Image (cartoon, grey):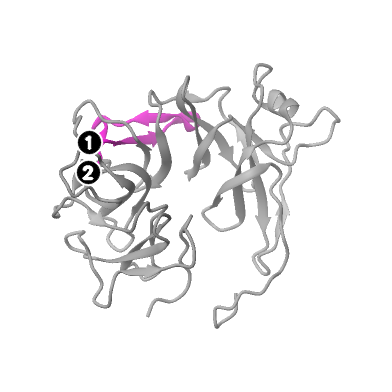
Amino acid sequence: MGGNGILTYQATFFTQGFNPFRLAVDSIGGHLLALDHDAPDPAACQLALGPNVANCADVTVFNVDSTTGRLSLVTNAQVTSASGKPLTYFPVPSNPIDFVMAQSFLLTLTGTPAQGDSVFPYIFGASGQLTLSQNSAQPLGIKQATAIVNAAGTIYVLDNESPVSNPNSAAQILPFTVGTGGALQAQPVGVIPDEPSVSDPIYLIQESKNSKFIYVANQKGNPQAAPPVPSGGIAGYSITNSPTLAYTPTVPGYFGTGANPQCLVEDPSNQYIYTANFDDSSVTGRLVDPNAGVLNSMRKGSKWALEGPATWCLVNGRTD
């Protein structure tokens, strides 16, 4: 990336599986991890995850050159293929939804309609090596998880199911801490209902300036909400005593976005929150009130058109 923001092509680096859809970096930017929806070799899945595994997903790990940004593949020192060569990827259970770095662990969120959603942990080493910490995935007792995120020292799982404590809400947030071997420990506060007027939570972030507020991007409106039903919106929460969350007061209960937001991102100056919206090809931006946590409209407009449908968010560089 040049000083004027122009991108110069360097090289193409390929993940080792098929259909990659999530990227993550470690805490020091030394490794890039890619979550592939489909691993290339079912036999290797069985070698890593057990003889009863028919297929699996995988994580491809790259070293990042700090000078050039170029990537080099980290091979799997734990599992060798049937040919005797080390695997070039790390198998994880099939049907991946998302993954997250948490302490010294990489946690993958997976699920199937029949078996429910679960979390599978790897120990993440300084060399980029992923080492199995448990022999099986941990069931979460839910079936419609959409994301797993790390915020305020707590692991939050977003779930598109109504909580028993508040059936008016279309979704819920489940807080956990990371325990021995990467196992998730449910917090005594229990599930946190999502804002009742929105649904389909897709992503969550914690604002960085004061670390007092959390925001959840919801892709749709709750059909049971009073009209007009929103096309999408951000629910705001204050961190009263982590992991306890309290709604950020606002009317009508959410902060509006474009239709079907795909992500949330905070700008480098910690002043603004943005969503990228798929259905109406737009970006929505809002100004963060650092005292109340309210997301205010911007003075010169809060919505900008894109050339095509948005699928993810990334912010880099200076904010004027």
Q: What residue is rendered at 18% in x and 47% in y?
A: 247
34 or 189, nearer to the observer: 34
The residue labelled by disc 1 is: 169
Judged from this view, the residue extending furthest toward the bottom is: 4
57 or 151, nearer to the observer: 57
Q: Secondary structure at mark 2?
A: loop
Q: What residue is rendered at 41% in x and 44% in y?
A: 149
Q: Quadrant of residue 251?
A: bottom left
Please name the amino acid that badge 2 sits on. Glu
Q: Decide: few, some or many residues near mark 1? Use Cα within 10 Å; few <14, some 14-19, many ≥20.
A: many
Q: What residue is rendered at 68% in x and 69% in y?
A: 68
Judged from this view, the residue extending furthest toward the right is: 83
281 or 88, nearer to the observer: 281
Looking at the figure, which quarter contains the C terminus?
A: bottom left
Q: Position of residue 41 (x, y in %)?
A: 74, 32
Q: What residue is rendered at 57% in x and 29% in y?
A: 133
Q: Magenta stretch containing residue 187, yes or no?
A: yes
- Please say if the residues under marks 1 and 2 sit with CB atoms less than 8 Å apart: yes
Please name the amino acid that badge 1 sits on. Ser
For the record, the magenta segment spans 170-194
Left or right? Give the position of 96 relative to 204.
right
